[in-house]
Amino acid sequence: MSLGIKRDDIVVVTSGKDAGKKGKVLKVFSNERRAIVERINLIKKHLKRRREDQQSGIVELESSIDISNLMLFCKQCNKPARFKTTILKDGTRSRACKKCGEII
């Protein structure tokens, strides 16, 4: 099953408390259909000091967000875009914006 969103993609959150924010995908969990996006869906976690160089206290971490709440960001259109899969001349597949045709 293809999710369409991969690591290092730039995405925009479409719904939820972080709607409209843009970030880079750090990790994708394909089985759960979730992704971790940089500086999106932050939670506070209380950490205990485990090593001498580690700091204890309250730390903000990114939590996973459902893939259905994310859209790829098209740099040419400068907004979130739906995408289609196209086959290039050399035989490889890539994703392209449905409006402008720019390869994402």
Image (cartoon, rainbow, N blue to C red):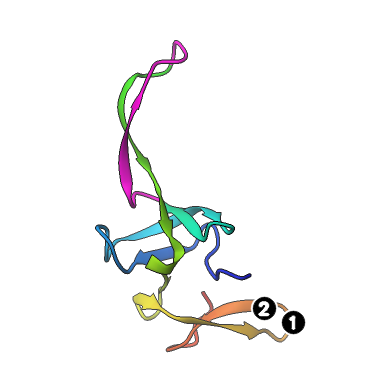
* Of labels 1 and 2, the one closer to you: 2
Q: Residue furthest top?
A: 52
Between 85 and 100, the one lying in front of the other is 85
Q: Residues within 10 Å of mark 2 (few under 14, many from 20)?
A: few
Query: How far from the left and from the top, in percent, is residue 45?
Result: 33, 32
Q: Is residue 50 magenta?
A: yes
The magenta span reads 38-53
Give the labeled residue for mark 1. Answer: 90
User: Can residue 70 be seen at all in this image of the molecule?
Assistant: no
Is residue 16 highlighted in magenta?
no
Which amino acid does the dot numbered 1 rest on? Asp
Q: CA distance from mark 1 to mark 2?
A: 9 Å
- Of residue 68 and residue 91, the one placed in the foreground of this image is 68
- From the viewer's perspective, is residue 53 above or below residue 36? above
- Taking the image as shown, residue 6 lies to the left or right of residue 38, namely right
Location of the N terminus (image quadrant): bottom right
Give x and y (percent) for residue 39: 34, 49
Residue 3, quarter of the rendered image: bottom right
- The label on residue 93 is 2
Mark 1 element type: loop
